[in-house]
Amino acid sequence: MEITSGKPAGGGGYAYSVKLTYNTFPLPEIKSNIKELITIKALEILSIREKYTTKTLAELYHQDYMPDDLLKAHQDLDNIIESLYQKERFLTDEQRLRVLLSMYKELVGKI
């Protein structure tokens, strides 16, 4: 979700700016049980990465060579995060962006 929100503001790449991407990312309220799930999944990802100490992060996250267990753990975390935004699964980045922009517009209107 965060990468999707940063593409338009970052010019289509993955560059981050405090004012244009990081501070403009709409994050819904997260219940404590979901925060715990997110933490567990994040720690699982770190644990899996420790199994591959001979690989650099670039090698671990190369789209053609990412280990299956690491990919699955990230997909699980993505599913948890995306469920905060809508109940149905997102099919495209365009759907994600529409939801994020709508939420951002609503948040800005409250200021």
Image (tube, rainbow, N blue to C red):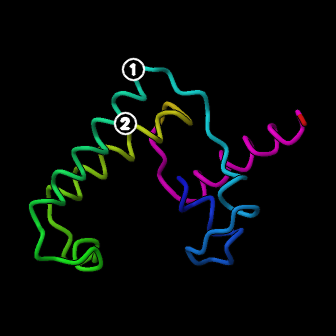
Image coordinates of residue 27 in percent, x first then y, are 62, 39
Decide if residue 110 is on the left or right side of residue 72: right
Taking the spot 90% from the left edge, 38% from the top edge, the residue there is 109
Taking the spot 51% from the left edge, 57% from the top edge, the residue there is 92
Image coordinates of residue 15 in percent, x first then y, are 60, 75
Say which element carries label 2: helix
Mark 1, other Cα within 10 Å: few <14 / some 14–19 / many ≥20 = few
The number of numbered badges drawn on the structure is 2
Relative to 19, does residue 43 appear above or below in the rendering? above
Image coordinates of residue 38 in percent, x first then y, are 37, 36
Relative to 73, does residue 55 appear above or below in the rendering? below
Marking on residue 33: 1
Say which element carries label 1: helix
Overall secondary structure of the magenta stretch?
A: helix
Measure the alpha-carbon separation of dots 1 and 2.
9 Å
Decide if residue 81 is on the left or right side of residue 11: left
Instruction: Please state the extent of the stretch shown in magenta in the rendering.
Output: 89-110
Q: Amino acid at mark 2?
A: Ile
Quadrant location, the C terminus: top right
Q: Amino acid at mark 1?
A: Asn
Relative to 10, does residue 45 appear above or below in the rendering? above
Task: Identify the residue under disc 2.
Answer: 38
Relative to 35, does residue 4 appear above or below in the rendering? below
Mark 1 near mark 2, Cβ–Cβ under 8 Å? Answer: no
Mark 2, other Cα within 10 Å: few <14 / some 14–19 / many ≥20 = some
